[in-house]
Structure formats: structure tokens, C-alpha cells
Amino acid sequence: MESGLKIFSNDIPVNGKRVIVRLDLNVPINNSKIDDDTRIKVIEPFINKLIENKAKVVLLSHLGRPKGEVVSELSLKPIFNYLEKKLNGKVYFYRERIDSKAIDASNKLKPGEVLLFENIRFFKEEEEDEETFAKNLSKLGDIYINEAFSCSHRKQASIHKITKFIDSYGGPILEKEIRSINLIIKNKKKPVTCIIGGSKVSTKINILSSLLESADNLVIVGAMANNFLKFKGISVGASLVEKGSGNTVKNINTLAEKNKCNLIIPVDCNTSSDVNGDSTYKFLKDIGSKDMILDIGKNTIDLINKTIDSSSTVFWNGPAGYYENKNFSAGSLSIAKKIAENTKSKSLISIVGGGDTIAAIKNTGLENIFTHLSTAGGAFLESLEGKELPGIKALKKN
């Protein structure tokens, strides 16, 4: 665990106390309906435990990027409607400014009741990490709990500066995220295999460099792999390739060799001239000028599965192909099934990050088998890079 970081536990008395919980309820909403409630479901048991322990629960969250303006489409009202049905206590919704009236509203809560505030990013002071605003936020409670690890890489008032003015803790879900990261880069159970996908190698150069220092195997999949194939002189046809990526790929290859990390790239593929078209299996040498590589092939799947079989820890971030078209989902589904199988039968430590990867896993119905599914996005990746997140640093100073 992070040194100096206070984690909230159930033996801390909350009866009659106002407990501010900063959440990340940034969920997809269309026509006032929540499309994916994963992030809310994860936090429900903790909120219900606070309710059970007679806390006066104050919830803060953002939705989208309104940039300090009131944007009706980004209101938390649909989330309030959801929580009203799901939580075990009376839920109220507060839509006004964070001022003395807001403080009065929090004080009037009865033990076991919940007050959800409107989108915290409707106030420009939030993203400015403005001190007076943070101080006013702190007056909404007696205890503050950060359960928004996914936002902790940002210096914002409800994540960062609020901790100057109130007794502050990390929440149990935030703690789990940090423990999962440490299982990859610090307290790792070797051999460690990292499977990384995505479209641009430049956006993940820092994480790739960091993982090369701790991983035994680094598997490159997705459109990112096209850059590695091209670097080796293999024609990738009309596949997506990032311009100017040659030096980056060269540096990653050099680092892999220096750290004695086995760098694995596709040996065959499934292609099409249309992302919405049918799949055609090809060896790399047979890729035509109009072909797009849209998934890994069966030999690559076998190679990755054997690597997973030899691993004690697996981290996966980024689908293996264009899984949105089922014709190109075989790679991602096979990886998901193999990791799930080994997690269940061989005590594999399996950690998955990234919304697209989790969406691919959900297509298998095996999401509950994995050791940890992180929805923390950029914060998770920055932690893997070795960066100290402002929100975590602030909790240590408290």
C-alpha cells in the first residue's frame, strides 16, 4: 500500500456525521437513460454501508466536460433517479451553488440519508482547483473520502485542494486500484505478461517504457501492432499506421532487449478492405495493398495463449482487434477467455484496464472472474508510468 495514505475503514465512527464521498459517476447517458451502470454498481455497496452505519452521506461527482457552464445534457438528474431506486436510504438532489444554503442542506440530513450534488464541473472553480471553492466544499461534511481514483490524476478542487480543510481518506475501491497497480509494478508475482493494444504507440510510449522494466513478456496487439510490423519491413497494406512512429518503435525494441523482456507481435492476421466487411485470414507475407489488418490470426492467438499459460500475472489494456465488428472480435474474445480460465483454475492474477477492453470482456460474460477490472482510465495508466497522482499525494499530506 502507498506509504502515508489513510484508507477509510468500517471501524471509523460515522454515526450522525456528514461524510463527503467524491465519486466518478461519469457514465454514458442517452435520452436521460443510463446506458452502462458499471461504475455506479461498483460503488453501491460502499454507499449502502455508510447508510447502514447512520452516516449523513454527501455525494460529489462530475459528468462529462461542461467547462464551468451549466449544460442540461450533463446534469446528474438521471443518476439521482437511479440512486433513488437503488440505495437503501432517502436520496435528495441539490442543484444550486456551493454556498451557505448548500451547507445548511447537508446539515439538515438525517442519519442514513443521502444528498447528491449537481455536476461539480458546472462550477469553473472546480477545474481551477480554487481554494475558496474547495474550502466551501469541505464545509459540506465532517469526513472526506476519495472514491474517484479515475479522477485523481487531475488537480481539481473536489479531488485535490479540499483535503487541506477536512479529515480525508482514500476509499476501499481507490485502495483496490492502487493495490492492483502495485501487483504489476511493485509486489509482482512473476512471470508478468502485459498485453497492450490501442491505435497510437505515441500515446502509450511512457507506459510501454515503464512496463518493459517490470514485465517478462510484452504483447503488442491492435492497430498499434501495425507500427511494429512495419518497422520490421512487413507490408501492412492499407492498415492504420501512425506517422513518424519509427523511432518510438525502435526505442521500445531496444528497451525490451536491454530489460530482457520478450516482445511479442502478431505472426498472422484477419483482414478486410472494409471495417464493416467480412474477415479474410492471411499470413503476414500475403497482405495486399488494399488489406486492413483488423484482428490477430489463429497462430497469434495460440502464441498469446501459451504466454498466458506460462504467466502468474497478466495486465491487459486495449482490444486485439476491431471487436465492434464480430468478424474481428475473435482475438479479444480468445484472450479474455484464456485469462478468465487461468484466473479461475490456476490462481492467475488478472488485471484489466480500459473501457474498450472491459466492453470486449463483457461480451464473454466472464467479467466477474477477473482479479480486477479498472475503469480508472488515464489515472490507472499514469500510475503504471510511475507518476504520483495529485489526488493521491493530497491524501498523504492530510
Image (cartoon, rainbow, N blue to C red):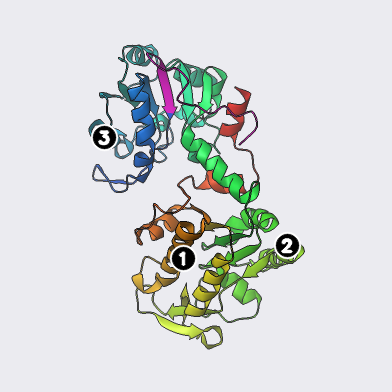
Please indicate whether residue 145 sits to the left or right of residue 230 in the image. Answer: left
Q: Position of residue 35 (x, y in %)?
A: 29, 48
What residue is pinned by disc 3? 86
Q: Is-magenta flag for residue 178? A: no
Q: Are marks 3 and 2 in contact (CB under 8 Å)?
A: no
Residue designated by label 1: 338
Whether residue 70 can be seen here:
yes
Taking depth in this image into account, of 72 and 225 the one nearest to the observer is: 225
Residue on which disc 2 sits: 255
What kind of secondary structure does the magenta stretch mostly adopt?
loop
Q: Residue at x 65, y 68 (%)?
A: 263
Q: Secondary structure at mark 3?
A: helix
Q: Quadrant of the N terminus?
A: top right
Query: Which amino acid is tagged 1?
Result: Lys
- The amino acid marked with disc number 3 is Lys
What residue span does the magenta drawing correspond to?
Answer: 1-21
- Disc 1 or 2, which lies upstream in sequence? 2
The CA distance from mark 1 to mark 3 is 34 Å
* Disc on the earlier residue, 3 or 2: 3
Q: Residues within 10 Å of mark 1 (few under 14, many from 20)?
A: some
Q: Say which label, 1 or 3, has the lower sequence index.
A: 3
Give me the residue at 33% from left, 24% from top. 51
**Mark 3 vs mark 2, CA separation in Å:** 49 Å
Q: Which structural element holds mark 1?
A: helix
Q: CA distance from mark 1 to mark 2?
A: 28 Å
Of labels 1 and 3, the one closer to you: 1
Q: Residues within 10 Å of mark 3 (few under 14, many from 20)?
A: some
Which numbered mark, 1 or 2, is in the foreground of this view? 1
Disc 2 is placed on an element classified as helix
At label 2, counting other C-alpha atoms closer than 10 Å, the crowd grade (few under 14, some 14-19, many 20 or more) is: some
Q: Amino acid at mark 2?
A: Leu
